[in-house]
Image (cartoon, helix red, strand yellow):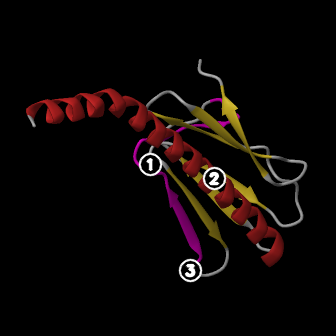
Amino acid sequence: MLIVVALIGTLAAISFPSVSSGLDSVRIRSATDDVATFFNAAVNRAERRQVPVELAISTKENRLTMRSTEPGFQRVLELPDGILLEAVLPALENENPDEARKIILMPGASIPGVGVQLANRHGAHRLVRLDPMTGFPRVESVAAK
């Protein structure tokens, strides 16, 4: 009985890093899909309702917020534990990292080419970018630096 318990413990210890890495991989994919859906919802809201929509992206708070001129409308996307909102691209000169980057989506106007870079604890990076030509979000893997 003691040998069986020792073998099970050894197998669990050996497999834990790969299971943990796999879970982080699933988390970053899910968070990337959530951010892409959030961007798509903001663009659709601006176009279909013909109202300006503000996207606030806060790297400090690890969240995205969507607001419009409609009374009481606000949506918030909190990223899960283990996923870091690493950067808002393109980087701006003299940008305060403690303040949220605010982007206004106007109905009928061109979509800004903004991107959000996400990272996990194992060093995986993904980039969600709004395509200015189509208005749809694109997801890209980013090579480690």
Can residue 22 be seen here? The reply is: yes
Residue 46 position in % (x across, y down): 77, 69
Residue 92 can be seen in this image: no
Question: What segment carries the magenta color?
Answer: 73-93
Q: Residue furthest left?
A: 2
Q: Does the magenta stretch include residue 39?
A: no
Q: In this view, does 109 lie to the left or right of 12?
A: right
Image coords of residue 34 (percent x, y): 60, 56
Determine the CA span between mark 3 and mark 1.
22 Å
Say how many tags the image has. Answer: 3
Quarter of the image with the N terminus in it: top left
Where residue 48 sits: x, y (%)?
A: 82, 75
Q: What element carries label 3?
A: loop
Mark 2 crowdedness (10 Å alpha carbons): few <14, some 14-19, many ≥20: some
Could you say which disc has been placed on residue 33 in the image?
2
Residue 89 rendering spot, x and y as whole percentages: 68, 36
Q: Earlier in the sequence, mark 3 or mark 2?
A: 2
Residue 76 in the magenta stretch? The answer is yes
Q: Is mark 2 on a helix, strand or loop?
A: helix
Please name the amino acid that badge 1 sits on. Answer: Glu
The residue indicated by pointer 1 is 61
**98 vs 121, nearest the viewer:** 121
Q: Mark 3 points at which residue?
A: 72
Residue at image position (76%, 60%) is 105
Give the amino acid type for the residue marked by disc 3 in the picture.
Gly
